[in-house]
Image (cartoon, grey):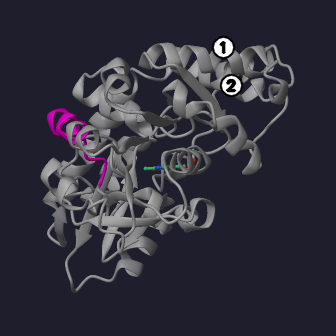
Amino acid sequence: MKIDLRSDTVTKPTKDMLDAMMSAEVGDDVYKEDPAVNALESRLAEMFGMDEALFFPTGTMANQTALKLHTNPGEQVICDKYAHIYNYEGGGASFNSGISCKLINGQRGMFTAAQAEEAINPPDFYHSPLTSLIEVENTTNKGGGACWDFEELKKIREVADKNNLGYHLDGARLWNAMVAKKQTPKQYGQLFDTISVCLSKGLGCPVGSVLIGKKELMSGALRVRKILGGGMRQVGYLAAAGLYALDNHLERLADDHRKATVIGEVLNQLSFIKTVEPIETNIIIFELDDNISETDFLNKLKEKNIHIIGMGSHKLRMVTHLDYTDSMHEALLTVLKAL
Ligand SMILES: *Cc1c(COP(=O)(O)O)cnc(C)c1O
């Protein structure tokens, strides 16, 4: 039995999801004639109480489009030093939008409104880049699935308003945050100008992300998506997976969170583990004692057909997901306890 905890992106569509995909009604989405895509987009716009939504092949493309919509070349986006847009999108912020990132030294990928305010370059000081956007990530990926304090997000909105800045949420794992903190999409829709959400992580779809936002920003989104090469045709087969997942895979994220917490408790008992970061959702980040080789540890797990990944700086990561079954969970705990 292969136990793959490298990421929640490794899931495969369930039989029922495949059936929903195969029976999708499709059309040419570049002409906006794909009924399944249109249904997914309007459902998400409505769910978040926002004006418009647009389907994307990847979360990276959705985020990159948002950056482009909020900025002009030469400007600056404020984000945490752990931000996905800074660390894991191939340098796209500079490549696609010609912008730089002003990094905040936050905690587990999160920062305070005061830190955001301090990071804004004075607009009349023409030597520094013009700040145009604040970007946050919920849950934080590199921060170990941490969830933002909603009150802090509100305070950052006030900072953005006061300084005339856009406010984008990278919500690749927002579903996890909302389930863990019992929050609603509308709460987030009221706060942000644009939000990207991912369908192919916790929700278990094979492909897909959606950018949701205010009309005045989203009016340019189709063009940017086209420029980035993301105009797709009969893509309703994939949108149908998203519709299915929203109906069937949302509430169950609580199972992933529960399993992650139990794994964390077991790891905490092991003598050679230095720290386990607090677990709020489905990501477990932990550190081995300095005298234990990461490679040896990873190989030892691999011998048992258990796969996890290194995050750099001596940190290791496991992510629970739809395809991580109860029996895999039992097997993993048995192996860990015997290490
Ligand atoms: C996965 C992820 C994305 C998007 O990734 P894609 O692989 O391009 O879909 C964006 N932000 C965060 C925080 C992520 O974890």
- State the separation of the CA atoms marked 2 and 1: 8 Å
SS type, badge 1: helix
Which residue is located at x 23 percent, y 28 percent? 181
Residue 13, position as x, y percentages in the image: 65, 32
Q: Is mark 1 within 8 Å of ligand 1?
A: no
Report the residue marked by disc 2: 239
On the picture, is 198 further left or further right than 117?
right
Q: Measured along the vertical axis of the image, is residue 99 above or below residue 114?
A: below
Which residue is located at x 78 percent, y 39 percent? 231
Q: Is residue 324 magenta?
A: no
Residue type of the residue flagged with mark 1: Ala
- 228 or 183, which is in the foreground? 228
Residue 54, position as x, y percentages in the image: 62, 29
Q: Measured along the vertical axis of the image, is residue 148 above or below residue 244?
A: below
Displayed quadrant of residue 62: top right
On the picture, is 112 further left or further right than 175?
left
- Any mark on residue 39, and which? 1
- 247 or 136, which is in the foreground? 136
Which residue is located at x 48 percent, y 52 percent? 7
Residue 206 visible in this rendered orientation of the protein: no
Binning the other alpha carbons within 10 Å of mark 2 as few (below 14), some (14 to 19) or many (20 upward) gives many
- 169 or 177, which is in the foreground? 169
Which residue is located at x 23 percent, y 52 percent? 110
On the picture, is 145 further left or further right than 217?
left
| Residue extent of the magenta highlight | 144-157
Residue 274, position as x, y percentages in the image: 16, 70
Q: Are marks 2 and 1 in contact (CB under 8 Å)?
A: yes
Residue type of the residue flagged with mark 2: Ala
SS type, badge 2: helix
Residue 51, position as x, y percentages in the image: 51, 19
